[in-house]
Image (tube, helix red, strand yellow):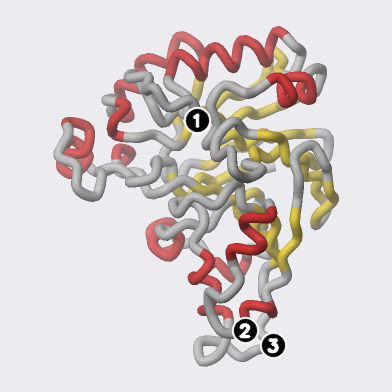
Amino acid sequence: MRITFTGTGAANGIPGYFQADRVSEYARVHRGEDVRYRAGAVIDGVLKIDWGPDTFACCERLGMRAKEWTHVFFTHSHDDHFAPREFQYLFPPFLPMEHPKPLVYGNAAIVDGFLGQFNHVEEVERFVIRSFAPLDVAGYRVTPIHAYHKLDEDSLNLIFERDGRSILYGTDTGVYQEDTWEFLAGRRLDCVILDCTDGMVPSEYWGHLSCRELLAVADRMRAIGAAHDGTIFCSTHHGSAGEATHEELERFFAPHGVVVAFDGMTLEV
């Protein structure tokens, strides 16, 4: 499998909308890997993970074509991940009604969140998915797991499996709760992508990970047999409040073998 990161930033991106912190100012000057759009990814060019407000810009920046994304999986309904009004451009007057449309998968808040957003919204096929209930989609086994994030809905992380390989996309979660650890025990994950919003500065909010918490999650995955010697660990969803540039994150994670994702990066798993 192949995963391409359409964005690797947290809710306000980097440089932050209104921020003048050191990391944002560095990104404004140096650009490149330090500029991070709001987080999302694509599996094998067809399965889109999250569709946030930067999706159009990501397509143009990376040369992607959204019409190739046949299935869209949402993790939760925070605005940086869920921009349902963008789907209006699949319908008249922008496209003919018969134009192919992606299938949408998410929790109940996602499925209901489309209602009333635009004309013809009922033509968007939406399916409720739930933590720990796998489904088969387009030749992939997709297993949602319970993220520790937005507690008024079933916030999800997602395991994608195909041809004996597996990727866990684990953004927007704090340290997993015991139900998720029990589910993951003994699973073989070949690539684990984890939230790193808090970077070098842990916050009081429990719904994201810092660099050191990411390492602790990785260690526990190895201890319970969910990760093996060849598992790729990767960080994403970085925030400027974490006070680390891309180079500083790479320097921190290098001794631990963790890859720091950047916008447009592709991993082969």
Residue 120 circle label: 2
Q: Amino acid at mark 3?
A: Glu
Q: CA distance from mark 3 to mark 2?
A: 12 Å
- Image height of 167 relative to 134, above or below: above
Q: Residues within 10 Å of mark 1 (few under 14, many from 20)?
A: many
Relative depth, front residue between 125 and 58? 125
Q: Nearer the viewer, mark 3 or mark 1?
A: 1
Q: Dots 3 and 1: beta carbons under 8 Å?
A: no
Q: Residues within 10 Å of mark 3 (few under 14, many from 20)?
A: few
The quarter holding residue 218 reads top right
The residue that label 3 is drawn on is 98
Image check: 245 left or right of 166?
Answer: left
Query: Where's the C terminus, which quadrant?
Result: top right
Q: CA distance from mark 3 to mark 1?
A: 41 Å
Q: CA distance from mark 2 to mark 1?
A: 35 Å
Residue 207 circle label: 1
- Secondary element under disc 2, as helix, strand or loop, is loop
